[in-house]
Amino acid sequence: MTSPNRPTVKPQAGFSLLETLVAFTVLALSVGVLLRIFGGGAQMTGKADEHARAVTLAESLLVEKACEECELPPGETGGEFDEQFRWVMRVEPYQPEGDAWPDNLPVEPFWVQITLEWGETEQPQTFGLGTLRVRTKNRPGGSPMGPRSALPYDHG
């Protein structure tokens, strides 16, 4: 029996303030984690794109600067692409480890190495590409005869 003077207690029909605050806190933490994950993925995609572009530029430079008709005097040259990429090309006579090249060969080998840098100047990203070329000895600055290989090298 219920007394007419006593109010009846109704069950709660919603969330308490504490439950709502906990739900918003969990939601905020989840959104923060998701933003970090997607933000990191976008940053990695950008770095991969820059690296792919650096590889393409290094290959293009190697073809352009060390072509069969091009004269490649020993030494170092460099330049820039799009104010983003800096490059250096080193040309030096190639000497294999161990035995020396015979003097009677009609060609002389030389190593062409291209290094690209991009990004911040304090900690730049780098990529290098090198190839072995040969030049005929019978005329000054002889003509390179083409690459033996074009391989990424350890420039560190």
Image: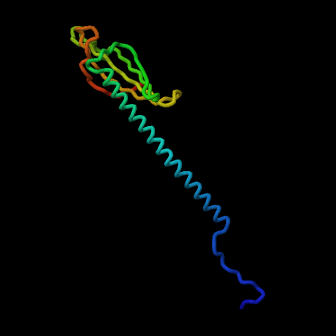
- Horizontal side of 63 relative to 4 (left or right) equals left
- Horizontal side of 63 relative to 120 (left or right) equals left
Residue under the image location 66 percent in, 75 percent down: 12
From this viewpoint, which residue is outermost toward the right? 5
Across and down, in percent, residue 137 comes to 24, 10
Pick the front one: 99 or 25: 25
Residue under the image location 46 percent in, 41 percent down: 44
Point out the image quarter for the C terminus.
top left
- Horizontal side of 128 relative to 9 (left or right) equals left
Point out the image quarter for the N terminus.
bottom right
Residue 97 visible in the shown view:
no
Question: How many numbered tags mark residues here?
Answer: 0
Residue 33 visible in the shown view:
yes
Across and down, in percent, residue 41 comes to 47, 45
Residue under the image location 28 percent in, 12 percent down: 100
Across and down, in percent, residue 121 comes to 51, 27
Snapshot quadrant of residue 92:
top left
Pick the front one: 26 or 119: 119
Q: Examine the rendered structure and indicate whether residue 144 appears above or below residue 55.
A: above
Pick the front one: 60 or 128: 60
Pick the front one: 70 or 128: 70
Across and down, in percent, residue 155 comes to 41, 25
Q: Examine the rendered structure and indicate whether residue 90 appears above or below residue 11.
A: above
From this viewpoint, which residue is outermost toward the bottom? 1
Residue under the image location 58 percent in, 54 percent down: 29
